[in-house]
Amino acid sequence: MFSWTVVSLVLLTSIANLVGGLIVVRKEWSPKALTYLMAFSAGFLLSIGILDLMPEGLENSPENGIYILIGFLVLFAFQRILTTHFHFGYETHEDKLSKKTGGLGAFIGMM
C-alpha cells in the first residue's frame, strides 16, 4: 500500500543527509572539533549497534552472529584496504589527493 507519509519521511531524511554531508565537506574543521565529532559519532554508532541491533538480530535467529561478524570484517576491510590514506593527530601531513577524495567520499557516503 502506498503511503505519502512514508514517502515524505524518506524524502526528508534524504534531504537531511545531503545537507549534513555538505556541512561536513564545506566547513574547515579544527583538529580538536574533528576529534570530538569522531568520538561522539563512533560512540553513538557503537551504542546503537551493541545495545539495540545485535540483541534484536540474535533474538530473531542465533545464526545471525556469523552475519554480524562478516559485516564487521567487511567494514574493517573497506576502512583499512580500500580508503585513501588519512589520519588525525600529530603525524598529519598535507596530501592534496586524499583531501579531495576524502571529502568526495564523505559526500557520496551521505548521499
Image: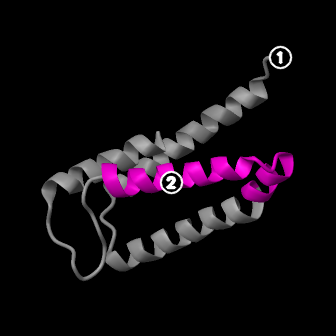
Which amino acid type corresponds to the residue marked 2 in the rendered image? Leu
User: Given this view, does label 1 or label 2 mark the residue nearer the observer?
Assistant: 2
Q: Is residue 23 visible?
A: no
Magenta stretch: includes residue 67: yes
Q: Where residue 20 is drawn, which disc sits there?
A: none
Q: Where residue 1 is drawn, which disc sits there?
A: 1
User: How far apart in space, not on screen, are marks 1 and 2 (Cα)?
Assistant: 37 Å
Q: Quadrant of residue 90?
A: bottom left
Q: Position of residue 46 (x, y in %)?
A: 62, 65
Q: Where residue 73 is drawn, which disc sits there?
A: 2
Secondary structure predominantly adopted by residues drawn in magenta: helix
User: Which structural element holds mark 2?
Assistant: helix
Q: Position of residue 47 (x, y in %)?
A: 67, 67
Residue drawn at the location 48% of the way across and 49% of the way down: 74
The quadrant of the image that shows the N terminus is top right
Count of numbered circles in the view: 2
Q: Which residue is farthest top?
A: 1
Considering only vertical position in the picture, is 3 above or below 101? above
Report the magenta residues as a range.
53-82
Viewer-side residue, 61 vs 111: 61
Considering only vertical position in the picture, is 110 above or below 52? above
User: How many other residues sit within 10 Å of disc 1, few (<14), some (14-19) or many (≥20)?
Assistant: few
Viewer-side residue, 7 vs 86: 86
